[in-house]
Amino acid sequence: MKKFIETLKNCWRIEDLRQRLLITLLFTAIYRFGSFVVLPGINPSMLEKLQSQTSGGLMSLLDMFSGGAFSNASIFALGIMPYISASIVMQLLAIAVPYFQKMQREGESGRKKINWYTRILTVAILFFQAPSYLLNLKAQASQALASGLSWPVFMASASVILAAGSMFVLWLGERITDKGVGNGVSMIIMIGIIARFPQAFIQEVATRLNAIAGGGLVMFIVEILILYAVVCAAILLVQGTRKIPVQYAKRLVGNKQYGGARQYIPLKLFAANVMPIIFAQALMFIPLAIVQYQSDNASWVVRSLMDNRSLLYNCVYVVLIIAFTYFYTAITLNPTQMAEDMKRNNGFIPGIRPGKDTAEYIETIMSRITFPGSIFIAFIAIMPALAGLLNVQQQFSQFFGGTSLLILVGVVIDTLQQIESHLLMRHYDGLLNSGRTRNSGVSAY
């Protein structure tokens, strides 16, 4: 504890780091304040039906990423998700379209162009999602609309407000990246997730203490121990890497010698990040959308796919996550390009011929580490469902796994690395005496 307090004092002594931390706190407070500013023409006390509708599926994912702004019908209801969707589309275009492939290889200028196209696409997505959100609001919580409200006028004005609010959230994230501790967009998502934790924690404690049968306080302690173990497993997953040794040939330039050093290519065990879980959750939301247009006598298969605790749901969910993990890893990591870059810089893997053999070797290693990584991701993704079987409350069970836990762990580790780099640059001790935050990750061989 004494070491931790001393580290906080060191953070405060460094003027640049102190300003970055204060700016991050300021922008975070602005974001949280906007999450409670309800759209004009909406009665906040009449949103119970919309809030109950966001208890599962894709709606729950959107509400979790927005920190409750989605169910509150606030000006930040759409949050940062339209920008994430646009970024995913641009990543896919950079693989399939030669024009964007060329742009991606142009370095900083190409990155600026891609960011500009991403923002334009974000605006286009917003003007599709905003009316869809308002139509869903009218269908699920029509009583929340003010009496005498002109629906066309409300639709037009509220769509503009939602789009502007989402772009303002994106601007906040970019300012956190430039002026704050970095990873602004990820920080916005993390803040939204953390904002749900205190209420979920209090509800779970109250439920366990009021339970006549079911373990009470002892069962709650068991839940905390399981949560701690899952968090440790998620840290190992996020930090796990497979290091491929690369030897660079020596070369003389004048009287100086360059190269000759051995470096490593860190292939992450968790290269696909949370994208497989997000894609799988989006597809698993389809049965719910189908049932909304069917009669009450839906088949047992559809009913099972609507229940996130059923065996069929979780089996299909695991298969989708594994498939999307392979798909997303394949489109984001290009072994051929890696081999060409290595050959261009006079690098080679010891014992492997440059060129095609190197690309095949990297692809083989990626395939071997992707499978256990996908199994690990799938296990963490179904942990909320397993926690639900132990009668854990819906909101609290989301922190046992899935996108919320993986995003929290990844962003916290990145933020710790950013802060620790500022401390080490000024010859202060880092945040941790032990651990692997300052290293590239935990090796997985």
Image (cartoon, grey):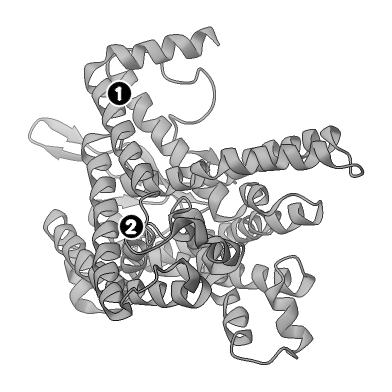
- Residue 200 at x, y percent in the picture: 63, 44
Q: Nearer the viewer, residue 189 or 154?
A: 154
- Residue 36 at x, y percent in the picture: 40, 49
Question: Dot 1: within a 10 Å radius of its alpha carbon, few (fewer than 14), some, or many (20 or more) residues?
Answer: some
Left or right of 69? Residue 56 is: right
Q: Is residue 423 above or below residue 33?
A: above
Q: Earlier in the sequence, mark 2 or mark 1?
A: 2
Question: Dot 2: within a 10 Å radius of its alpha carbon, few (fewer than 14), some, or many (20 or more) residues?
Answer: many
The residue singled out by tag 1 in the image is 422
Residue found farthest to the right:
213
Left or right of 38? Residue 404 is: right
Q: Is residue 305 visible?
A: yes
Residue type of the residue flagged with mark 1: His
Q: Helix, strand or loop at disc 1? A: helix
- Residue 300 at x, y percent in the picture: 78, 85
Give me the disc on residue 77.
none
The residue singled out by tag 2 in the image is 75
**Image quadrant assignment for residue 118:** bottom left
- Quarter in which the N terminus is drawn: top right
Q: Residue at x 65, y 70 (%)?
A: 317
- Residue 124 at x, y percent in the picture: 25, 74
Residue type of the residue flagged with mark 2: Ile
Q: Nearer the viewer, residue 289 or 271?
A: 289
Q: Residue at x 49, y 14 (%)?
A: 4
